[in-house]
Amino acid sequence: MLAGLVAEAGDLDAIVSGFAEAGWATVTPAPAWTIAHHIAHLAWTDDIALLVATDHASFRAEVGSLVGHLGDAVDRLARERAEQPPTSPLVGWREGRAALADALTSIPDGTRLPWFGCSPAATSTSVVSTARPPVLIVGRTEDAVQPRPAEVLLTRPR
């Protein structure tokens, strides 16, 4: 799955890297988000995932700072990064995803990692894999609206 994530990100990078400045301002179906917002959001989530892979205490502190206003924070962080010159979020995303891929390759299969979501004692599962490291979050869907550390299981195909 990690190879798929790297390939998918490379495909998207190939598309957006050729954009002129006006292309970065293209409105998307996400309300008030442009292409720049989406790339900025990917860069931020890669930064957060890198913390998960390398510094659990910092990740938990970040989660704690977002409790109760995750949606607003996601929009604000995407907007702040999207307002930079277009190449800045793209360079940040490239650097972050490369560091994340390197960090994830060093984590043994089956390792439990913290992530946003619900408590690990919840009863059902959901898979989060859209442009993110493939992880299994144990919990109820309705609990995922508030960020709380949850245990996730990183798995790679054999």
Image (cartoon, grey):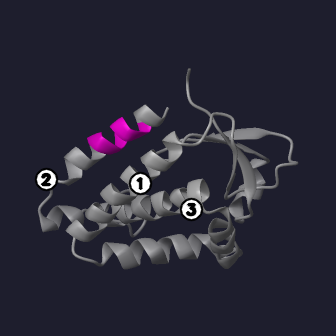
Disc 1 on helix, strand or loop?
A: helix
Number of residues whose C-alpha sits closer than 10 Å to that of mark 3, classed few (under 14), some (14–19) or many (20 or more): many
- Alpha carbon distance from label 2 to label 1: 23 Å
Helix or strand or loop: what does disc 3 sit on? Answer: helix
Q: Which mark is residue 20?
A: none
Name which residue lies at 45% across and 65% down: 44
Report which residue position mark 1 lands on.
99
Q: Is residue 20 shown above or below 10?
A: below
Residue reaching furthest to the front: 106
Specify whether residue 6 is painted magenta.
Answer: yes
Of mark 2 and mark 1, the one earlier in the sequence is 2
Quarter occupied by the C terminus: top right
The boundaries of the magenta stretch are 5-11
The percent position of residue 14, horizontal first and vertical second, equals 21, 45
Question: Relative to residue 114, is residue 1 drawn left or right?
Answer: left
> Residue type at mark 1?
Ala
Picture coordinates of residue 108, whole percent (x, y) = 62, 37
Q: Is disc 3 in contact with disc 2, using a CB cutoff of under 8 Å?
A: no
Depth check, front residue: 145 or 90: 90
Instruction: Identify the mark at residue 51; answer none if there is no mark.
Output: 3
Q: Which x, y percent locates residue 33? A: 38, 66
What residue lies at 46% left-to-right and 75% top-to-bottom? 77
Q: Amino acid at mark 3?
A: Leu
Q: Is residue 124 above or below residue 57?
A: above
Mark before the other along the chain sequence, 3 or 2: 2
Q: Residue at x 77, y 55 (%)?
A: 118
Q: What residue sits right under mark 2 in the picture?
A: 18
Mark 1 and mark 3: span between their CA atoms? 10 Å
Is residue 27 visible in the rendered structure shown here?
no
Q: From the viewer's perspective, is 140 left or right of 78?
A: right
